[in-house]
Image (cartoon, rainbow, N blue to C red):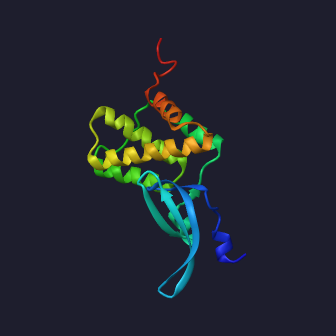
Amino acid sequence: MDSSEKANIFSLGEHVVYPLQGVGIIKKIEEKTLRGHTSLYYEIFLDISDMTVMVPVDKTDELGIRPIVQPKEALKAIEGISNKLEQVPVDWKARYQMNVDLLKQGSISSIAKVVQILYHRSKIKELPVQERKLYDSALRILIDESSLSLERPREVLEAMIFSKLEKDPKGQEA
């Protein structure tokens, strides 16, 4: 198998997750020549930002671009969301970097963790603008990917996520 076959794992019309960017759809797969070097590229339309990006096929692993998760994994990520406040750095810059690192991991569970952390932090104190944007982006990616994976409307997934974030703790009352 040559490198273009190995790396060309996505098909036209397939939805993918591009960490820190959002959920996109493969619109084209085409050869492009840049600086005398010809490579295959994915053209990915990202609905979240109404933007199209060109990504070299052989860089998808490096960039963390991955297919939409299976329904079981999407449900596990949503079920993992809790109403508990996580211990996180008080300094917003350290917290922001921690959350960016989690998003770069690209897994749906790490995206759900960022949503949980920043949601609960926002209930204590208003988030700085950069953290608010990070929260909004992580929430949108989580909703979009879960909606595609579970084949349910975005509104249903959004309601599920918020019900987990705001759920009263069970078994803690005497």
Residue occupying image coordinates x 50% and y 64%:
63
Quadrant in the rendering for residue 128: top left
Q: Residue furthest top?
A: 174
Residue occupying image coordinates x 54% and y 51%:
107
Nearer to us in this view, 125 or 44 = 44
Residue occupying image coordinates x 73% and y 75%:
1
Nearer to us in this view, 32 or 80 = 32
Left or right: 71 as drawn, with respect to 140: right
Q: Position of residue 162 (x, y in %)?
A: 45, 31
Q: Position of residue 4 (x, y in %)?
A: 64, 75
Q: Residue furthest bottom?
A: 36
Q: Position of residue 96 (x, y in %)?
A: 34, 50
Left or right: 102 as drawn, with respect to 71: left
Residue occupying image coordinates x 52% and y 18%:
171
Q: Residue furthest right?
A: 1
Quadrant in the rendering for residue 123: top left
Answer above or below: position of 27 versus 102: below
Answer above or below: position of 104 versus 56: above
Q: Position of residue 48 (x, y in %)?
A: 43, 51
Answer above or below: position of 117 versus 50: above
Left or right: 149 as drawn, with respect to 97: right
